[in-house]
Amino acid sequence: MKLQDLFYYRTLAETRSFTQTAEAFYISQPSISIALKRLETEFDTSLISRDRSSKSVELTEAGELLFEKSVEITDLIEQTKKEMHSLGSQTVTLGFLPTIGGHFLPQIMPQLAEYLSDLKFVEEESSDAMYELVKKGEVSAAIVGSDRQTLDDSHLIQLPIAQKQLHLWVSPSHPLAGFKRISSRMLKETHFVTLAKGYTHQRIFEQWAKDHQIEDSYIHYSNEIQTANSMIASGMSAGLMIDLLVRDRSDIVKLELTDAPEFYVSLLVNKQAKQSNRQEQFNRKLVETVQKTFN
């Protein structure tokens, strides 16, 4: 059996089209048919059923099983290629969120100057997305935000960097703008904007809203931080965010909450990921720097 046949089969099962599969690999349709025949011979079973009149492709029960396994196998092969390539690479990676990284990187990078020529930054808007990259080993180390002080993951080293309270943000013309400190009972009729699903702020806000009985109809969602800030500045909504997400804006006022939820910033390092000697050296230096700077 040829490993490449599994890549062909996975795409065929996903597209249900010989034409699209052939085009995806820049080969002829008969080549896909031959690869399919090799797999059916190897496993001594039929993998697909074809309705010639409608030109549709359906997977047999055995075909469904092989599709499931082919996804696992081809993903593993691709990940192995990446890891083997990284072993001989001098490139080192560091992941961060633009909003958080822009605040903490200036305190970290001067002590990592020796790696600057080899450093590749990986940016993600969402801490959840960055966490998954670190967990999978696609990014060796990253600065992320979380709604939990401690992440329960034995594969990761977690070093605390900062603990931030969320504040209430409103426009200067908002009825609440005249108060210095706000309690949840003052917010029953207030409309809110928060970041959409996949953002740490969204989880923190939704838990806070549930605890304080904020009605869903009063909550609006945005995929962009700047859009959320603009909605707040317009006076349409209030927002709960850490101050790192609202900077250099004179059209938004920060108010203290009596029972403000917390946002935690940490350095995550995947201690089990396959990595080059250069990346291991960088990670050790990064951990030392964070411990010295923030602890």
Image: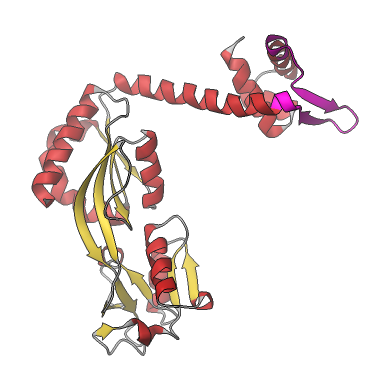
In the displayed structure, 271 sits above or below 206; it is: above
Residue ID at (39%, 65%): 226
Residue 76 location (% of width, % of height): 48, 24
**Residue 227 is drawn in which quadrant?**
bottom left
Residue 266 location (% of width, % of height): 24, 50
Residue furthest to the left in view is: 292
**Residue 23 is drawn in which quadrant?**
top right
4 on left or right of 174: right
Asked whether residue 283 is in view, the answer is: yes
In the displayed structure, 41 sits above or below 112; it is: above
Residue ID at (26%, 63%): 244
12 on left or right of 84: right
Magenta stretch: includes residue 56: yes
**Residue 260 is drawn in which quadrant?**
bottom left
Asked whether residue 23 is in view, the answer is: no
In the displayed structure, 40 sits above or below 185; it is: above
Residue 191 location (% of width, % of height): 45, 80
Residue 171 location (% of width, % of height): 35, 81
Q: Can you say which quadrant of the picture contains the N terminus? A: top right
Residue ID at (43%, 61%): 224
**Which of 144/230 is in front?**
144
For the magenta stretch, what is the residue range?
A: 40-63
